[in-house]
Image (tube, rainbow, N blue to C red):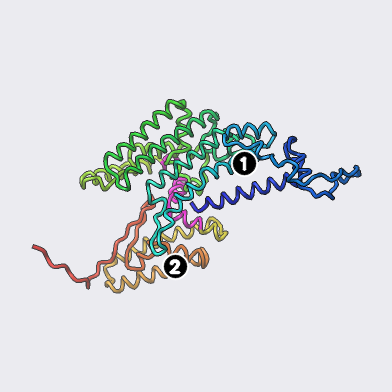
Amino acid sequence: MSLRPLLIAASLLANAALLAAFVFQPALVPPAFQNFFARGFHSDSTPANTAGATAVPATKPAASARPDLWSDLHTDDLSNLVARLRAAGFPISAIRAILQGELEARFGARMRALSQGDPDTPFWKPTQSLGMDAKRMAEYMQLAGERSKLMRELLGNFASRDDGDLTAAQRRQYGNLTAAKIDQIDRLNQDYNEMTREVRAAMNGITLPEDREKLALLEREKRADLAALLTPEELADYDMRNSPDTSRLRPALAIFNATEDEFRAIYKVQQAFTDRVDLGTNFTAMTPPERTAFLQQRTAAQKELDAQMQALLGDQRYTEFTRASDRDYQQLVRLAERENLPAQVAIQAYDLRSQVSQESNRLYNDPTLAYDQKLAAFKTLAQNTRAQLVATLGPTAGEDYAKSATWLTSVERGAAVTFTPTGGTSTRGLPNPNAPTRPATG
């Protein structure tokens, strides 16, 4: 929410720049108003042109040239306002800037009031953030939706671009869909988002089974409406572009540098896994037997997914893909990029984990070492690993990663660490023989 004042300020600056352009270059102004800007914003002593032509006699000051300019154009009917501005020859960029100002006047104060919360809250008490208040959030999003919808209705495809074409972001989201279908999808999404917000606002932070069913029903209805609007091929392409699976895959695919063919194949396999295993399962609502059965099913499905991915990509590319899917490696890549280090450096730092895992488990299972000796060896292993990370990534990135690596902290405290192929981590702490035993209960 903190970006909104910056966006408003940027819009105001853009409007000021546009006005300045009209002042100093009247030729840019629509013909009907060129005289106003050409005469009104220049001093009486300024000649009309300096290329040898006879100077134009001094005219009246700007304010008296066309004092009713804006009153002639302005109307509270925004559709009529757009029509008047178009008829007067204003460029679409100017019309869009004027509309943004009009919409800010209509929606801005209410949206700011919702985002800022109660202004009377004493400074020593926390203010409730917008995201923590479902009712306020629903109202805010409704206003934002109305504002966006109104802009689209008034300008259509010109709401975001001077040429009326789709933006790059829209092309990524919608592919080759027609503008008419994109507008229908936007309206459909807005309607269902509004209904979803109403359900969540009524929940008041407490999710009951009937609430989950209402939300699931809305998703089913939305899906049916999308299927009625798009052809099967269009729906499949829209799903691929907007699927939660695609969102989850993008960070890995960027590092993996996947081709489009690789992405489509990976997406197809991942989608089959998601259809089989509900990633949004609510564990708290399960009984212990249900939880055990679900975890077993998910483990089996994960093994099948891994085997299919390996067969699809081949051994080398599969290794690269699984590494790119690991959040730990993604963090190392970001740190390396921040420090302008070669990509290979992130791989070298990542591979240190395997060495630490092997050595920590060897120490854990060594029967010749006493507890205190093992504990000291674990601390030495952690210290040496930190030094290697600093040597590999540099002092800044190396220290930053070492501080955030919880697995390294576990090793320092006396635990063996094991990394799973899917990015998971498990630890085994050394059993302390000096720890007091719990009394037996009858």
At which x and y percent is residue 403? 43, 65
Above or below: residue 378 compared with residue 335: below
Q: Which residue is mark 1?
A: 98
| Label 2 packing within 10 angstroms: few (<14), some (14-19), many (20+) | some
Query: For this rendering, which residue is in front, 202 or 168?
Result: 202
Query: For this rendering, which residue is in front, 48 or 242?
Result: 48
What amino acid type should be assigned to the residue bearing mark 1? Answer: Ile
Residue 347 badge = none
Q: Which callout, 2 or 1, points at the residue further toward the start of the chain?
A: 1
Instruction: Name the front one of labels 2 and 1.
Output: 1
Check disc 1 and report its element: helix, strand or loop: helix
Residue positioned 52% across, 42% down in the render: 106
Q: Name the quadrant of the C terminus.
A: bottom left
In the rendered structure, does residue 273 fall within the stretch colored magenta? Answer: no
Query: For this rendering, which residue is in front, 377 or 202?
Result: 202
At which x and y percent is residue 96? 61, 39
What amino acid type should be assigned to the residue bearing mark 2? Answer: Arg
Q: Which residue is mark 2?
A: 386
Above or below: residue 388 compared with residue 164: below
Above or below: residue 93 compared with residue 438: above
Write down the region rendered in magenta. 309-334
Q: Is residue 122 left or right of residue 164?
A: left
Classified by dominant secondary structure, the portion drawn in magenta counts as helix
Residue positioned 43% across, 30% down in the render: 226
Distance from disc 2 to disc 1, alpha carbons, whole Å, reads: 57 Å
Q: Is residue 365 left or right of residue 184?
A: left
Residue positioned 80% across, 50% down in the render: 43
At which x and y percent is residue 156? 57, 33
Check disc 2 and report its element: helix, strand or loop: helix
| Label 1 packing within 10 angstroms: few (<14), some (14-19), many (20+) | some
